[in-house]
Amino acid sequence: MHKPSIIFSVLLTVLIPLAIFLLSSNLILRIPQTYEFYFNDSQSIDGIDYSITVSKMGKSICSYFSSPGNDDFQVYEINGQYKDPVFGDKDKTVMKNAKDFLFKELVAGLAALLFAVLIYVNTVKKKLRQYLRIESWIAMGVTAFLFVLQLILLSSKGFRAFLYSTFIGVSLTKSSNLLTILGGSFFKTYLTFDIITGIVLLLIFAYVNHKYTKPERIFYSRW
C-alpha cells in the first residue's frame, strides 16, 4: 500500500545531501563576510594599485552575484571628480561566468530542497517514520562524505584548475587585478566557511528529523 511512498522516500538519501551541499556553497559565495575575511587575512587587496577598502570590495562582489540582470562587474576608485575602474574586460568576463554558475547552482540546490521537503512531508504523513530514520542517517552520512571529498579534491591545484577551466574558462594574465585579489589561497577560506555552513545546515536537519521521527512513547503525542 505504501510502496510508492517508500520508494520515493529513498530519494531523500540523495536530495538532502545535494540540497545542503549546493546551498551552503552558494550561500557563502554571496555573503561579504567570506571575502572580507580572506582579504583581511591575505592582505591581497594591497597588491592592486587602487585605494579600495576591504568592506567595499566584499560588498561589491556579493552585490553583483546577487543582483538580477547582465550588467558588467566593476568597482571604482573615486579620484576627485573621476571614477577609475579597477577591473579589466577579462576580469568582468570571469565574474559574469561565475555569476551564471552560481545562479545555476542556486536553482539546482533549491530544486533539490523543494523535492526533498515534499517527499519528506509525504513520508511523514504516510506514517513511515521508521524509513525516514534510516534514510536520514544515510543522508547525513552522504552529506559528510561530500564535504570530505570536496576538501580532498579542492586541496589539489590540478583539480581546482580543472574546475576553473570547466566553469569559467577565461585565462587571466598575472597583471589581472581579479587574479591578484582572489587568485591566492581563497579556496581555503571557501572551504572553511563552506564546511561550517554545511555543519550548521546538517544540525538543523538533524534536529527537525529527530523531532518528526523519534519513536512514539506512551502518553506522548508528537503533534
Image (cartoon, rainbow, N blue to C red):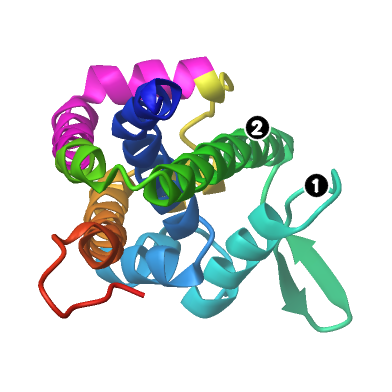
* Region of the chain picked out in magenta, as a range: 138-166
Identify whether 212 is placed above or below 159: below
Which residue appears at 26% of the width and 76% of the height? 221
For badge 1, the amino acid type reads: Asp
Report which residue position mark 2 lands on: 97
On-image quarter of the N terminus: top left
Closer-to-camera residue (2/156): 2
Closer-to-camera residue (125/39): 125
Q: For the image shown, how many numbered marks are present on the structure?
A: 2
The verdict on residue 178 being magenta is no
Give the overall secondary structure of the magenta segment.
helix
Neighbours of disc 2 within 10 Å: few (<14), some (14-19), many (20+)? some
Residue 111 seen in the figure:
yes
Q: Residue 5: image x %, image y %?
A: 42, 29
Disc 1 versus disc 2: nearer the observer:
2
Q: Residue 194: image x %, image y %?
A: 30, 53
Q: Is residue 144 left or right of residue 104?
A: left
Residue 86 seen in the figure:
no
Residue 64's quadrant in the figure? bottom right
Identify whether 81 is placed above or below 96: below
| Residue furthest to the bottom | 80
Which residue appears at 76% of the width and 78% of the height? 79
Q: Is residue 172 left or right of residue 47?
A: right
Closer-to-camera residue (162/66): 66
How many angstroms separate mark 1 from mark 2 (CA)?
11 Å
On-image quarter of the C terminus: bottom left
Report which residue position mark 1 lands on: 72
Residue 144's quadrant in the figure? top left
The verdict on residue 161 being magenta is yes
Identify whether 186 is placed above or below 61: above
Which residue appears at 59% of the width and 71% of the height? 59
Badge 2 marks a residue whose secondary structure is helix
